[in-house]
Image (cartoon, grey):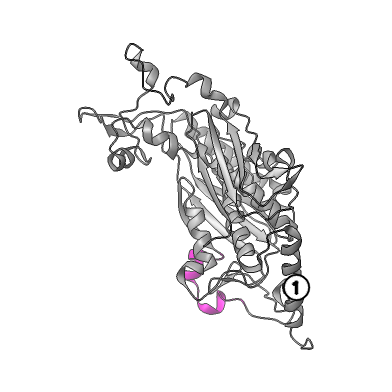
């Protein structure tokens, strides 16, 4: 059973989103304005976002689990209000509709969008109005994930683990990456409207997004999440559900519109011979690798479902957003006639924002793996257990005295 669990609740145009995270030890310094709100703001950024981002300015209100700036060990509940709810109060009311009211105010959706959860959702849950599905299926839900992930990142930060991301490609435009990524990766890319390290590619990405917007289309892309400072030994090879690569891939695939996940070389590794894929082992690694180093990182920091002590490298492919102003054919749920799909207010491209969500999901899995291995009801206990393990790794280093 996971030591760290999280849940989210709320609809895209409802009153608010709820984020609930359980399992954080007592004694972790945590302030929403310092530790959570900056990531919520990062999730709302990026070139190609829609008008909704001009309305919302997400902040987290801590409802429980924190007192006087420190966690209590109890569940942490956070509220993220939807400022746009005032325009949706009738459509998203929890009360039965007024039989004398204007039916247009209910904003029902009967033309499911190809690529979205609209059609499969109404069929699965026996609904007649796709609004009942799309409000929860919306990527607006990821604001709650980012809030929970920010708490997990705060915990990891205490243990010297940093999680960051950058955009690798938008549509057909791929960034040219440096031989080594900046240590402060987020600091290097957050000022970029596409969160990319390649200024030349950034300009072409913006052009592609503008062209897509002009033609009523959308664009996807690829982003990469990097986690540094992860010690060797998280995860396990003994059971399918304890393999950390599987857990990370599953968490990242759960993000809306993600259709592919790679670790390390990923699919490129399938095109190379083994001699160009596997990472040689050297007696020169850092203390979190027990002194066993690697001159390369084709494995992306994971072998056999267990961390190697090298940086985790996780790459995600995001499909184009399914709401198109140039609408695709659909079928009216009321009478079966062929018509064009519905249009909801949406983005043209949200890959930079999705990368921030990828950070959150990675941090949540890593924080749970840390707590699973080192335990601790308080931060002091967790620190003692972790430091004892790092000391053990030093004793296992090549040539070290037993």
The residue where tag 1 is placed is 388
Q: How many marks?
A: 1
Q: Is residue 264 visible?
A: yes
Kindly identify the residue that appears in the image at 51 percent across and 37 percent down.
Answer: 140
Residue 98 in percent (x, y) is at 36, 15
Answer above or below: position of 203 versus 21.
above
Report the side of 172 relative to 342 (left or right): right
Answer above or below: position of 186 versus 161.
above
The residue lying toward the viewer, choosing from 336 and 129, is 129
Residue 119 in percent (x, y) is at 31, 38
Secondary structure of the residue carrying tag 1 is helix
Looking at this view, name the residue that lies furthest to the right. Answer: 401
| Residue range highlighted in magenta | 264-279
Q: Residues within 10 Å of mark 1 (few under 14, many from 20)?
A: few
Q: Is residue 286 visible?
A: no
Report the side of 22 relative to 255 (left or right): right
The residue lying toward the viewer, choosing from 88 and 359, is 88
In reply to whether residue 280 is colored magenta, the answer given is no
Kindly identify the residue that appears in the image at 43 percent across and 19 percent down.
Answer: 90
Answer above or below: position of 57 versus 252.
above
Q: Quadrant of the C terminus?
A: bottom right
Looking at this view, name the residue that lies furthest to the top. Answer: 100
Residue 134 in percent (x, y) is at 40, 35
Answer above or below: position of 396 versus 14.
below
Q: Which quadrant of the structure image shows residue 192?
A: top right
The residue lying toward the viewer, choosing from 26 and 368, is 26
Residue 299 in percent (x, y) is at 57, 70
């Amino acid at each position: 059973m996971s030591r760290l669990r999280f849940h989210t609740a709320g609809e895209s145009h409802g009153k608010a989103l709820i984020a609930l995270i359980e399992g954080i030890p007592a004694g972790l310094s945590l302030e929403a304005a310092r530790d959570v709100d900056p990531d919520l703001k990062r999730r709302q950024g990026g070139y190609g976002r829609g008008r909704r981002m001009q309305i919302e300015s997400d902040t987290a209100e801590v409802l429980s689990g924190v007192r006087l700036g420190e966690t209590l060990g109890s569940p942490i509940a956070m509220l993220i209000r939807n400022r746009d709810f005032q325009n949706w109060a009738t459509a998203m009311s929890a009360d039965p509709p007024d039989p004398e009211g204007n039916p247009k105010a209910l904003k029902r959706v009967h033309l499911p969008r190809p690529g979205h959860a609209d059609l499969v959702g109404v069929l699965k849950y026996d609904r007649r109005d796709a609004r009942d599905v799309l409000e929860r299926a919306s990527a607006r839900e990821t604001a709650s994930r980012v809030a929970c992930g920010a708490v997990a990142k705060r915990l990891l930060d205490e243990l010297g683990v940093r999680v960051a991301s950058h955009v690798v490609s938008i549509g057909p435009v791929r960034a040219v990456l440096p031989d080594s990524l900046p240590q402060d990766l987020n600091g290097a890319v957050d000022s970029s409207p596409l969160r990319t390290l390649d200024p030349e590619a950034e300009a072409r990405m913006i052009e592609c997004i503008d062209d897509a917007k002009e033609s009523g289309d959308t664009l996807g892309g690829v982003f990469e999440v990097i986690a540094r400072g992860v010690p060797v030994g998280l995860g396990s090879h003994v059971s399918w559900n304890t393999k950390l690569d599987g857990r990370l891939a599953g968490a990242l695939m759960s993000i809306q519109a993600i259709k592919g996940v790679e670790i390390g070389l990923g699919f490129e590794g399938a095109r190379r011979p083994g001699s160009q894929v596997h990472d040689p082992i050297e007696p020169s690694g850092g203390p979190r690798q027990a002194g066993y180093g690697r001159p390369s990182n084709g494995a992306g920091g994971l072998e056999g479902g267990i961390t190697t002590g090298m940086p985790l490298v996780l790459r995600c492919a995001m499909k184009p957003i399914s709401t198109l102003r140039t609408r695709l054919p659909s079928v009216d749920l009321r009478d079966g006639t062929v018509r064009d799909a519905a249009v909801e207010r949406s983005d043209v491209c949200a890959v930079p924002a999705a990368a921030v969500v990828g950070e959150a999901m990675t941090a949540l899995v890593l924080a749970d793996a840390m707590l699973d291995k080192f335990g601790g009801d308080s931060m002091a206990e967790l620190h003692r257990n972790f430091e004892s393990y790092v000391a053990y790794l030093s004793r296992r280093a090549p040539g070290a005295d037993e």
